[in-house]
Image (cartoon, helix red, strand yellow):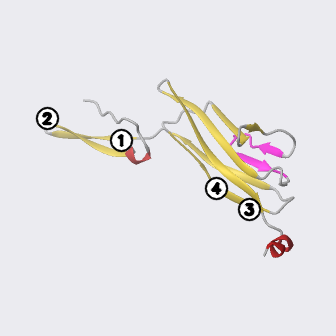
């Protein structure tokens, strides 16, 4: 017997019961999704000149190690220079001194392979500057 779920999505994960009529027995089959990449926060509001660390939770099930984890500033701008520090496990990105130039959307992408099929999952995070109180009062 074969359980075939087409276009699998998060809501398909769970435990399915398989009933075998000829033996009057049933078996439990667990359907596990292959990955999740989630940022701890989706938005960071930072004062200009401060440091921010963007952290992610990366889970790949069953547990193959990701082939590649990359960080970019959307749209696909490589992060270069001393102002950006990616942790050794690639699960976090630190921007040492946030300025208007660093504000924007950052993407962490995870590439991995399961049963010969390649996957690429990502999560986006927005870093924005906190408005200066003086500037905010001028706008009002």
Residue 97 image point, x, y percent: 85, 53
Q: Which residue is mark 1?
A: 30
- Asked if the residues shown at circle 1 and circle 3 are in contact, with their CB atoms under 8 angstroms apart, the answer is no
Q: Is residue 42 left or right of residue 26?
A: right
Q: Which residue is mark 2?
A: 23
Which residue has dot 4 on it?
Answer: 42
Per the image, the residue denoted by label 3 is 45
Residue found 49% across the figure and 23% down from its top: 116
In terms of secondary structure, where does tag 1 sit? Answer: strand
Q: CA distance from mark 2 to mark 4?
A: 51 Å
**Left or right: 140, with 121 as reference point:** right
Sequence-wise, the earlier of marks 1 and 3 is 1
Could you tell me how far apart the alpha carbons at marks 1 and 2 are, in whole angstroms?
21 Å
Q: Which residues are magenta?
A: 84-96
Q: Nearer the viewer, mark 3 or mark 2?
A: 3
Placement of the N terminus among the 4 image quadrants: top left
From the image, state whether disc 2 or disc 4 is nearer to you.
4
Q: Callout 3 environment at 10 Å: few (<14), some (14 to 19), or many (20+)? A: few
Label located before the other in sequence (3 or 2): 2
Q: How many residues crowd mark 2 within 10 Å: few (<14), some (14–19), many (20+)? A: few
- Tell me if mark 4 has few (under 14), some (14-19) or many (20+) residues whose alpha carbon lies within 10 angstroms of its own: some
* 10 relative to 43, above or below: above
Whether residue 37 sits left or right of residue 15 in the image: it is: right
């Amino acid at each position: 017997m074969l359980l075939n779920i087409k276009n699998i999505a998060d809501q398909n994960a769970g435990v399915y019961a398989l009933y075998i009529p000829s033996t009057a027995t049933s078996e439990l089959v667990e359907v596990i999704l292959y990955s999740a990449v989630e940022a701890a926060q989706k938005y960071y509001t930072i004062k200009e000149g401060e440091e921010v660390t963007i952290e992610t939770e990366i889970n790949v099930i069953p547990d193959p190690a990701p082939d590649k984890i990359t960080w970019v500033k959307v749209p696909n701008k490589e992060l270069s220079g001393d102002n950006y520090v990616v942790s050794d496990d690639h699960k976090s990105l630190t921007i040492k001194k946030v300025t208007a130039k660093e504000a924007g959307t950052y993407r962490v992408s995870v590439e991995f392979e399961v049963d010969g099929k390649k996957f690429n999952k990502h999560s986006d995070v927005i870093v924005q500057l906190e408005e200066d109180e003086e500037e905010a009062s001028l706008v009002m």
